[in-house]
Every structure is written in C-alpha cells, then in structure tokens.
Amino acid sequence: MPAILESQENESSGPATLPFPPVTKSHILHCSYHYWHPKYRTITPKARLIPLTQPFLDYLRADGIVLPSDDEPQQRTEWSDTDSGVFSASDNPDADESDEEAEEDVAAEWRQVHLAIRNTIAELGGRVMPKLNWSAPKDATWINANTMDCRTPQDIYMLLKSSDFVTHDLEHAFQDCVDSPDSTLQMQDIPYHLALRKTVPNYNPSVEFRCFVRERKLLCLCQRDLNHFDFLFHMQHRLRSLVKEFFEVRLRDTFPEPSFVFDVYVPQPYDRVWLVDFNPWAPRTDPLLFSWMELLRMPAPLEPEPIGEADFVRISLNGPKPAAGAEPLGPEEEHLEEDPEGPNDDDDDDDEEADEEADEELSMPELRLVKATDPEAYSFSTPQYSAHKLPKDVVDASQSGEGLREFARDWQKILEQRIRQDVSDSEDD
C-alpha cells in the first residue's frame, strides 16, 4: 500500500526537470537578429543593423546613466601668449577646470557608433525601436514614457542601460548551453549588433503571434498580447492557414535549426504575414499561453496524405453491359432499371467535403487565444514586467510636489540613520 501511494505522489508531482534536449551555443547564435535578418529581410519590417564596438559595450555595462551630447565635440586649441594681443588660457586659471568638466565626452571612444545611430534614426523616418541581438528592452519602457519608440540616440541609451533583458544578452547569452560537436564558442565570440527597427504607424499588438516549431513541424501558436480580443475568434481558421502557409514556404526548410520559436505580425487586411523575431527552443523563451511540458509532449499535426494511383477509379461511360446470354435492354427497360430517385450525388459531395475538412483540421496547428472568461483577459493597464512596478509610497508621493519632497526628506533621514548605525557598529568592532 505505501508503495502505491508513493507512486501516485510521484506521478502527480511530475518530472523535476523539463525533458529538454541540450541547448547548444550555436542554436542560440542562430536566433540572434544579426544572423537571421539578412536572410529574411524581405519578409520583416524595415530595420538596420549597427555593429557595436567594445567601448560601446563597456558603456552599456557600466553603472549609472551618463548620456553623451548630441553635438560634435569641440577640439581644444592651445593658445600662445607670445603676442600680448592674443588671449592666453593660462591667464584664466579656472578655465581648464571648468572646460574639462563641460567638455568631458562619454562617447569619445565610440563616437562613430553614436553617429551611426543618429544617422540611422534619420534614415528610418525619425522614429525607431531598438533591440540587441536577442532582446528588446521592453522591461525598461517605464523610463521612456512607457513606450519603445525612440527619436534620439539618448532615448535608446536610456532604454538599453535600464533593461535587465539587455543585461542578460550581454552577460548570460550562453547560460545553460553546451558547445556543438563541431564548434566551441565563448562570450567574446559574439558579434553584438544594435538593431533599429522602423516604428510601424498604428501598430496593433493584438495580431502578433508566437509560433512553436518542433522537428520542423508547426505545433501551435498563440497571442503575444495577453488580453482578450473578441475579433480574433472570428478569424481563427484564416490566421492558422496564413501562418501555416508562411511557415511551410518561408521557414521550414531554410532555418538551420529543426526546433525553434518565431514571432509573426498579421496586419490588416489580414492577408500577409511579417516575420518579427526568432527565439530559442529553450526554457528561457516564454511559452505564453502554453507550458513547456505541454509543448514537449504535444502530438504534431498530421501530414496530409498525397494522392496516389490507388485513389483513382476507372469509370465506364457506356453504362453497364448485359450479362452473358441476356437480351439487351430496350430504352424503356433501361429507364425502368434506373434509380427512381436518381443518383445521390449531393450526399456524396457533402461526405467528401466533411472528410476533407476533418483532415484539414487535423493538419492545422492549434491556435490558442485569451478567452473573455480568463483571469488575465482585461489587464490592459497592468504592467507586464516587474520592473515597471514601483512601491506604493513612491506612487502616492508622486501625486503632489509636497508629497514628493516629504518622501525625499524621509528617505534622506533613513539613509543618514543607516550610515550612523554602520559607523557605530564599526567602532564597536
């Protein structure tokens, strides 16, 4: 009896870890924007790639946010005082100090990257959305008026330096990965790029979908925006057909990995699919409305059977022949031999259509949408990432200037008290 109970507990608890195949570093690199975008640029929204230098990566990794000036740095000029009519900088001893503070250029070592970003923004119409190799700084939009839309290089720097997603790209891109048998990759081998995508006017996130591919078979897809949109339920078959055809024609045999996740956008009039991104087939990718255990165990859609010779039937156009020894039928007898109700072709056609629809349904990927009864169906104003959320005291204090000043004074007192406590503790030691 105890053994039975123990086995039941083990079955209910499920496996401790997901039965994932090893995730290789090359698999992660194949999902990098700089790797796949040149191949699929004709089916993606307009974007430009900017290679990033090591000084710029060091700037992103550095603590604090210091934004460079958008003006060209002025070259310092050495003045000579041999002629009494020429002003000498040495005549003003405070000038050097003030000039150094004012002229410090944080972008001095990566000025070319800064200029490339500024020029690309202008080339793409003045509004772009930034993305590093794998991640967009969506968790940092709180610092940019809750939007990914950037109009200046400074907007981009603030988003990148405030994002935990970008930090993960920079520091942990190969976390929990193994080397491929034919290659060994290290973090320093990653060619980091900044992707600037042109802001799409009237972008509708409700028609952006995440699609899951296992062993080159499209298993399923779901919404990326986790809110309820009633109109999606009336176009499910159309969406499934569009995405399935897009995958089979564009991605199935061209992407180097057999299992992967990709995001698509289906704008009005809902007759074309745009590729947005690739993601690894790995636990780090958010399965959204699915679970990874469900995706790993989900049966693949059936492949439609090809029509062979055995499916063709030879039909005689001369009617049935009389049996041996029987007299030929006359016109009246032939008429009497016919079915009085006539052939039931309509029923046969209906049965064939029903069978075809059933086969087509079995070969289609599952589309999962947020229903009106789901708890998260109406979370339009709820922040998706924890980084967007602030303590209640900060929110309350921000409602008025006096409240914010009072909060700042209280916070300063707490810090001073903590410093005094640390000093007294060190003296006691």
Image (tube, rainbow, N blue to C red):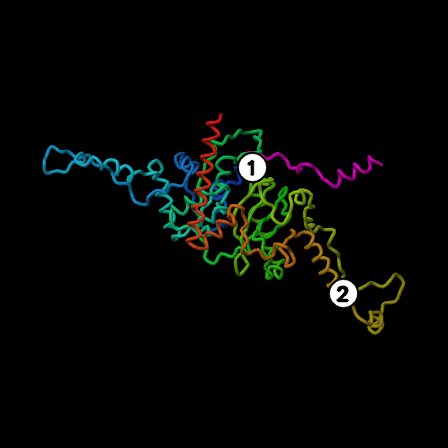
Going 78% across and 67% down the picture, which residue do you hit? 343
Q: Which residues lie in the magenta part? A: 1-28
Above or below, comparing residue 194 to residue 377 in the picture: above
Above or below, comparing residue 331 to residue 15 in the picture: below
Going 49% across and 53% down the picture, which residue do you hit? 396
Circle 2 residue:
347
Above or below, comparing residue 23 to residue 272 in the picture: above
Above or below, comparing residue 322 to residue 61 in the picture: below
Q: Residue furthest top?
A: 429
Look at the image and say whether residue 334 sits in the magenta stretch. Answer: no
Q: The disc labelled 2 sits on which kind of residue?
A: Asp
Instruction: Out of 379 and 212, give the one closest to the viewer.
Output: 379
Image quadrant where one finds the N terminus: top right
Instruction: Locate residue 297, reporting x and y percent.
Output: 69, 43
Give how far apart the Cα atoms at labels 2 and 1 are.
52 Å
Quadrant housing residue 83: top left
Going 72% across and 40% down the picture, which residue do you hit? 13
Instruction: Locate residue 302, reporting x and y percent.
Output: 69, 49
Instruction: Locate residue 305, reporting x and y percent.
Output: 70, 50
Q: The disc labelled 1 sits on which kind of residue?
A: His
Look at the image and say whether residue 10 sits in the magenta stretch. Answer: yes
Instruction: Out of 323 and 369, give the one closest to the viewer.
Output: 369
Q: Categorize mark 2 by other alpha carbons within 10 Å: few (<14), some (14-19), many (20+).
A: few
Circle 1 residue:
27
Going 75% across and 37% down the picture, which residue do you hit? 10
